[in-house]
Every structure is written in C-alpha cells, then in structure tokens.
Image (cartoon, rainbow, N blue to C red):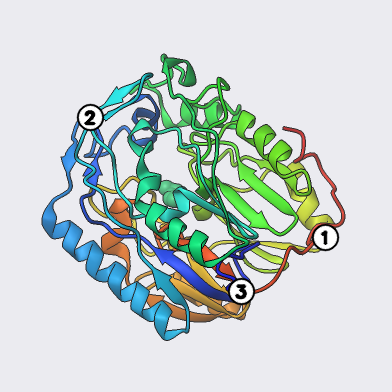
Amino acid sequence: MTKIVNSWNDFDPLKHVIVGRADNSVIPPEEPATSEKVPVDSEMRGMWGPRPTETVEKANAQLDNYAKVLEGLGVKVDRPTPLQWNQEIKTPDFRTESGMTQMPPRDILLTIGNEIMASANSFRCRYFEYLAYWPLMNEYFEADPEFKWTQAPRPRLTDKSYKHNYYDEKITLEERLVRTANKDFVTTEAEPMWDAADVMRMGKDLFIQHGLTTNLKAMEWFKRYYPDLRVHSLNFPGDPYPIHIDATFVPLRPGLIINNPHRPLPEDQRKIFEANDWEIVSAATPAHDEPPALCYSSVWLSMNCLVVDHKTVIVEESEVYQAEQMDKLGMNVIPVPLRDAYAFGGGLHCATADVYREGGCEDYFPNQAGDTTLV
Ligand code: DAV
C-alpha cells in the first residue's frame, strides 16, 4: 500500500510538496473581494490582463530552482497543470472577466492528515483555480487508497457575500485599522468562505485567521466537519489588509512561533500559547521597504518561510535579517531566491502546499486557555 498524503502541521519533516507555477497568470479585474485587498495606492488599481511574459519567465525560473533545491533535500516535488486563466468565469450567480494563477497552491489546498481539501475562496477570479491541481489529486487518489480527495462547499459568491459600501478610497490607514480591529471585513457571513492559507494547522488544533478572505461561518463549518479537532479564531488588528496567516503568525517548530510585530496577536488570544509554553517571538524587520512591482502582498513576505524540519528552514535569499534571526533561534537556514515570484501570489510558503510530512496528529495545546474557540 502506498501512502502519499499525510501532513498535520507546518514543521514536521517534509517529504513531498507541490510547488506552484506562474504560467498564464493574470491580474484579475476588480471585483467586490479584490477591490478591498489591493492597497489603494497600488499601481495595480484599475489595471488587469495577462502579466508580462518576461515577469512570468523570471518567476518560473525561480520557482523551478526552488523545486530543485527541495529535491536536493530529498523532498519529492509535484507541479500543477496550468490553465488558460485569461478567460471569462461564469456561473449561474456571477460573471467575471478572468481567472488568476496557479502560483500559490497554499491558498487553495488544505492538507489535514490524509485529506487534501480545495478551499472556498472569496475571490470570484479564483473560482476555478483548484482545477490546476486536479490532475495531481487524481494521481494521489489512484495511488493512495487512504487519500481523501475533498472539495469544501462551493460558495455562490453572489452580491450577498460582500459588503457593497465597504471600499472607500478616501478612508485613512487609521480608519482602516479601526475597521479591521472591529473585525469588520468586506466579506459578509452569507455563506462559509475561506482561503486555505488562513488556516494554521497544529495537529489537534486549527488556528484560523478571521480577515478579508475567511469569515466566521467558515470556522463554524470547520468545527462541524472536523469534530475531533479544535477550531480557534485568531485576528490581527494591526493589519490593514488581513489576508492569510502565513506572513503574520508562523510556527517554526513545536513551542515556537514568529509573529509580525506590526500585527501582534491580542493578549486574550495569546493565553492558549502561553498556557502550553509556546514562545511567541517578534519576527525580524523585512530587508525591503517596498514589495516588488505589481505585487498584492506586503513586505512581510520576509517571514513567509518554508520549514523543512524542526531544525531547517528555507528563507528568501534577500531577507538577510529574517535569516539572521532564524539562525539565532537555532534553525539552519537555506536561502532561496523567490522575490521575482512574489507578485504572482506570495512567498516561499504560499508557493507550496504540503503533500507529506512525517509525524501524526499531536496535541500541542492540552491546556485550552483563553477564548479563541469563541467564534
Ligand atoms: O502580508 O501581504 C501575504 C500572504 C500571502 N499568502 C501580506 C500577506
């Protein structure tokens, strides 16, 4: 019997992973969910269409190299099958002019034990992104009799799923931060919506970021779907564009998490970590003042690292301060260049999805202190 799929966290020894591709990537036209995510001063506002070929080639060169480095570490690497994203997406409920990419598998695929589930993304342009991974899912399904191939309930993404007076280009940063601190996001609670990159997997506990891309109904859905796991809602008030937990709160090994110092976890939500002797350390300052051109993500992709095992971490090559901090925290650092791929949907962690890590479903938080389970 071949066991292909198994992963319960982001730090046990990595043996098999999917690395994204930049082919055919498109900057999608504005839609209710993305209009809030793209920063108001971004050069991408009002711009859409296929990304320039030269940038796709540069991103792919770095992604291919990343895959080679992983293979050199003994990790099996699979790649998605690109689709033509520059075509209209139409369902009975909505219509948008294009898809987006298959660069960040982390946003789409959530691996929990022997199950890989495609997410319920709130961006209409991402509605069919899972298709790029279906050939791999089918392969795993044929080879591994225990593999559970799952699709979360597809959200309808009608106009009811978004607040329509939410986007306001005149809103100040301070006002924006008040809004996110009040957990007032562009998505409504009309139906469960979530990006897989909002879910931090820790064995028996799932810590899920409540933000622009994941709502509370999704957490309720997770609670019912995984009755043996404990689902916690986290939010990070210092983030004006809270999307995905993996540039904000990143575990390095059992007992140690780095937290974005601009987005500290609120006191009441820290209790569960403190009560179980987990250390939360402020992440190092990013090496860059600005994200690269046409990039959705912030400079904090500096901390979007890929942990290979409890002692080894891959950090983006130019992120010297983050690498130095990892070294001080006792990790061996492998630098890999990936900045040319950032604009396509994120950093080293975003660009991958787990297929197999050693280890099982551990209970890292036997003391369930605090109120993070109140969703
Ligand atoms: O800080 O812009 C990026 C996360 C991408 N998966 C940020 C979050």
Q: Is 92 situated above or below 116? A: above
Q: Which residue in the protein does label 2 denote?
A: 97
Spatial CA distance of label 2 from label 1 is: 48 Å
Pointer 1 local density, CA inside 10 Å: few below 14, some 14–19, many at least 20: some
Q: Amino acid at mark 3?
A: Met
- Depth order, front residue of 85/242: 85
Q: Which residue in the protein does label 3 denote?
A: 1
Spatial CA distance of label 3 from label 1 is: 37 Å
Question: Helix or strand or loop: what does disc 1 sit on?
Answer: loop
Image marks 2 and 3: residues in contact by CB distance under 8 Å: no
Question: Helix or strand or loop: what does disc 3 sit on?
Answer: loop
Q: Residue at x 58, y 79 (%)?
A: 328
Which one is earlier in the sequence, the residue at label 3 or at label 1?
A: 3
Image marks 2 and 1: residues in contact by CB distance under 8 Å: no
Q: Amino acid at mark 2?
A: Glu
Relative image position of residue 58 (x, y in whole percent): 19, 65
Pointer 3 local density, CA inside 10 Å: few below 14, some 14–19, many at least 20: few
Q: Is residue 346 visible?
A: no
Question: Helix or strand or loop: what does disc 2 sit on?
Answer: loop
Q: Is 245 situated above or below 225? A: below
Q: Which residue in the protein does label 1 denote?
A: 276
Q: Residue at x 30, y 60 (%)?
A: 21
